[in-house]
Amino acid sequence: MKAIGQQKEERIVLRWHANSALAPLCQIISLTSILSVLTVFAVGVLKSLSGGPDWPLLIGLFSLSLLSAIAGKQLAYNKITMTKQRIEFSPAFCFSLIFKCKRKWTDIGAIALVEEDLDSAPEDDQERRLLHFHFSSGGFVRIPLAELTVADLDALFRGSKRWGSTAVMAPELIELRRKLVAGPSPSMNLSLTTLWEKELQAHFTTSTFVPLAAGTQLNHNRYRVISQIGAGGLSAIYLARAQNSKKVILKELVLHKSSESSMDKAKELFKRESSLLIKLDHPQIARVHDYFTENGRDYLVLDYIPGQSLRQLVDTEGPRLEDKVLEWANAIAGILQYLHSQSPPVIHRDLSPENLVLGEDGKIYLIDFGAANEFAANATGTLIGKQAYIAPEQFRGKPVPASDIYSLGATLYFLLTGQDPEAISESNPQTVNKSVSIEMGNFVAALTKLDLEQRPENCSLILQKIAELRATDRGAVISIREN
């Protein structure tokens, strides 16, 4: 498969030989068409010698043969063309696309990595690992990962990043591309599938977890799974459609069997916290609409917020400028202030770049909660979460509102440096990115103090200091502890 690349700054084309079940059929069609053309030519010659050919019939047969040859050639190759206006797929995909091969970028609901036919395919069958495009107006495209080279994947990312920012990109896909770009190039073409397998193993080797298939109906057919768009620990994230045709996010949790008392306690906590989350009403928090249990799996139903996670944004575009990070910090601190002002305070426990989305309107949204992770911790005794963003006291099983403040600081560090902070450490982004001001570096370091007593007491104080930072030239160190 060859990525032709960008043409005239507004066109990216991928074209590769089909390795699917259509390939033998295409060869047969092409061979038959060639034989047909030769046969028509021979018949024409014989007819001419015997008194004159039937020209309309011969022209019709010749045209049909020629069209068959062209169709066979077209089906023998897969092609994707990306422009500012649309993404276009070759005729080989017409059936799965419901004969609508030209799609607007806004029609792409999600791009994910999926694994199909697990029961029927051999364990070493790489063809079952697929790059999945889901379209909101119906239809899908699935491309075997084994057919893609690093250049192909990079071209797809460039096109999707430039023109398809509304599509939900699976975190595993972003992470895979990041590792491919960072890794040694000579072996890349041979290791795409292997690298993705390692990504899946990182998520699922600790359980017998099997993600739900597209089309699965849940909660008495109230929700239909469209595609899996993320996974982590013992959970998965799905894009789904509710009965009212509205898109929603399903967060699913599957646990190992533990002691009955531990499971009951965890489920009760999950139910209680889910009830609290449903009552939350903030314009920049993905609303939790429902929670339910089905076939031993527990689910949260949240708003679907189109956009790009801050993790995806930084991974594809690099560290953000300090002024923009302060703007986002102001929004995130405002969200945390609302959560911590509830009675009792709602502690997020899982604030990180993955759970913050830059929406199509340019606003920051919080899209996930740590209730499911707390559920897992209580049932299994295992801490679930992103260790680089978890406060020391949360590691000890005693999260407090200031734990979210630590996670905020760790998130700001990532936004400014493009790197995850070291777990359980005070993080100053200026040590990595020298363009960060001293004041901003000290601000982030203060948020990530290991000692609770040295962190800001509340989000109101953080908002005040952010306002001071944004209003100054950041030429002097600003204390963020009350005098």
Image (cartoon, rainbow, N blue to C red):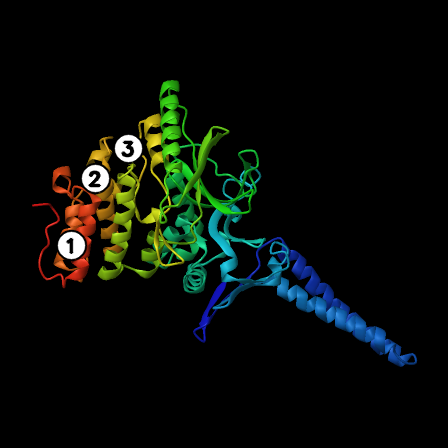
Foreground mark, 1 or 2?
2
- Tell me the number on the disc at residue 441: 1
Residue occupying image coordinates x 14% and y 47%: 446
Under mark 1, the amino acid is Gly
Give the percent coordinates (x, y) of residue 310: 33, 53
Query: Mark 1 falls on what kind of element?
Result: helix
Total numbered badges shown on the rendered structure: 3
Give the percent coordinates (x, y) of residue 216: 55, 39
* Camera-nearest residue between 322 and 2: 322
The residues bearing labels 1 and 2 have C-alpha atoms spaced at a distance of 19 Å
Q: Which residue is mark 2?
A: 402
Foreground mark, 3 or 2?
3
Q: Answer yes or no: is residue 273 visible.
A: yes
Q: Answer yes or no: is residue 183 visible.
A: no
- Asked if 308 appears above or below 264 in the picture, the reply is below
How packed mark 1 is, by other alpha carbons closer than 10 Å (few <14, some 14-19, many 20 or more), is many
- Tell me the number on the disc at residue 344: 3
Q: Quadrant of the C terminus?
A: top left
Marks 3 and 2, the one that precedes in the sequence: 3
The residues bearing labels 3 and 1 have C-alpha atoms spaced at a distance of 32 Å
